[in-house]
Amino acid sequence: MHPTVGSMVRFMVRRERDGGFNAASRAILDVMATLRTGDVAASVNRNVMAGWINDALARQPIVDLHTHCYAPGFGCSPEPDGLLLWGIDELVTYHYLVAEVFRVVPAAGRSGPTMPYEAFWRLSKAQQADHIWQHLFIEHTPISEACRGVLTALGKLGLDPNERTLEPYRRWFADQDPNHYVDRVMQIANVESITMTNPVFDDHERQVWLDKPAVGDDPRFEAVLRLDPLLRDWPGAAARLTEWGYDVREDRGGGTRDEVRRFLVDWIERMRAIYLAVSLPPDFCYPDAKNPAGDWFLDECLLPVCAERGLPFAMMIGSQRLVNRSLQDAGDMTGKADIRSVVNLCAAFADNKFLVTMLARENQHELCVAARKFGNLMIFGCWWFVNNPSIVEEITRERFELLGTSFIPQHSDARILDQLLYKWEHSCGTIGRVMTDKFCDLAETGLDITREQIDRDVALLMRDNFRAFLQR
Ligand code: RAT
Ligand code: ZN
């Protein structure tokens, strides 16, 4: 931009802030801002800047690095054991909403209607969905993030979110073919790749991989080898490996180390896994004198294999499983973890790559600081209980402020395919707001912001940082 024009624009923006700015001059500023889309002026006009950023976010195909969605080859709901969950009854019985419905219709102990846990779990999926719809969407305002998400998803499919019952939605979903529906959802959500979570200790899923060697070939989906029991319950995991033909000993003697490595390599290859992952409790420690088998597994088995194969190890830290067992999947809690474990691992294993997300809001700032210290640490996502607009906004701001654009702002954690439609819509809205503030602040310094620059940064955040981290 010509320096004189630049200073004029900046002067006008300051006037706008001071309230001394009328509609005509704002219109002039809008025109100036769009004159040279290749290089400049939007740098200082908030509306134009927001337009450019939101447009870039809407155009950018997304790589979703952590979901629980499966390729249709794994079977589709409502088939029994179908692993790809989709459709209105799954959407409405998402475990976040199960937890919420017990707030308004408790299991016991209050006057008014109750729903004992066992009675709820005995209902069919459709009956559970009807109960949740009636109490969270009809009799109460569906204001929570998880409720709002259902409505956003329906709207993105062209359905009216004002229906009083689920029947019209059921009829619409009954007409969809799940395989084509995957394409449709990915196209609307602009997700170009869905990363599954593939727990090898799940008997049903393990058998699908063994029975159908081509099940991982769907180009829309990538696999991730999920290994929680190996780190959290070595004796249990060792017994399973023995059953599966690996010569491992609970005391870790003999050839146990090599056999565990052979197990990991077999499954990395079978799944063509793009990274390995675990979810860890808030009290996870490394090193951990109380869990020597866990340290041994990391030091001797998992991290050497990851380093040799160039694969990241993902740690999702902070989930306290089943503080209320009766709620099943909905019964988990969050807790603050010790960032020193992440620091210790990144320092001790400089040749390894770590993907880390943490569940406690209290851990987010120190996780950013840790990432400043270690290039082999990539932080990602606003996970589960911190995936709410107010907290996503706060976390995304501190990440930009401490890490520039060198982080992965979000993953969907979608368990039900249709959730891709809202999780990304909601996240991009928040990311767009934060980016607009940050780019306007930059423009205030006099820096010319270009549209190409915005496109490049959005591509880094939504796809390319992850891709580059996988390849390094
Ligand atoms: O966010 C969730 O849906 C949780 O239930 C967990 O699945 C968590 O994301 C995990 O991957 O363990
Ligand atoms: Zn998850």
Image: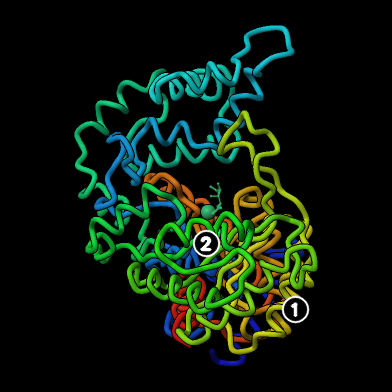
Q: With respect to residue 443, does 118 lie above or below?
A: above
- Residue 467 lies, in percent from the top left, at 44, 78
Residue where numbered disc 2 is placed:
227
Q: Residue at x 48, y 50 (%)?
A: 423
Q: Is residue 149 left or right of residue 443?
A: left
Q: Are marks 2 and 1 in contact (CB under 8 Å)?
A: no
Q: Amino acid at mark 1?
A: Asn
Q: Is residue 43 left or right of residue 55?
A: right
Q: Earlier in the sequence, mark 2 or mark 1?
A: 2
- Residue 316 lies, in percent from the top left, at 61, 61
Secondary structure of the residue carrying tag 2 is loop
Is 447 or 205 nearer to us in this picture? Answer: 205
Q: Within 10 Å of the Cα at label 1, are there few (<14), some (14-19), or many (20+) other Cα atoms? A: few
Q: CA distance from mark 2 to mark 1?
A: 21 Å
Is 437 or 320 nearer to us in this picture? Answer: 320
Secondary structure of the residue carrying tag 1 is helix
Q: Nearer the viewer, mark 2 or mark 1?
A: 2
Q: Residue at x 24, y 44 (%)?
A: 178
Q: Residue at x 72, y 68 (%)?
A: 292
Q: Within 10 Å of the Cα at label 2, are there few (<14), some (14-19), or many (20+) other Cα atoms? A: many
Q: Which mark is residue 344?
A: 1
- Going by the picture, which residue comes out furthest to the top? 112
Ligand 1 within 8 angstroms of badge 2 C-beta: no
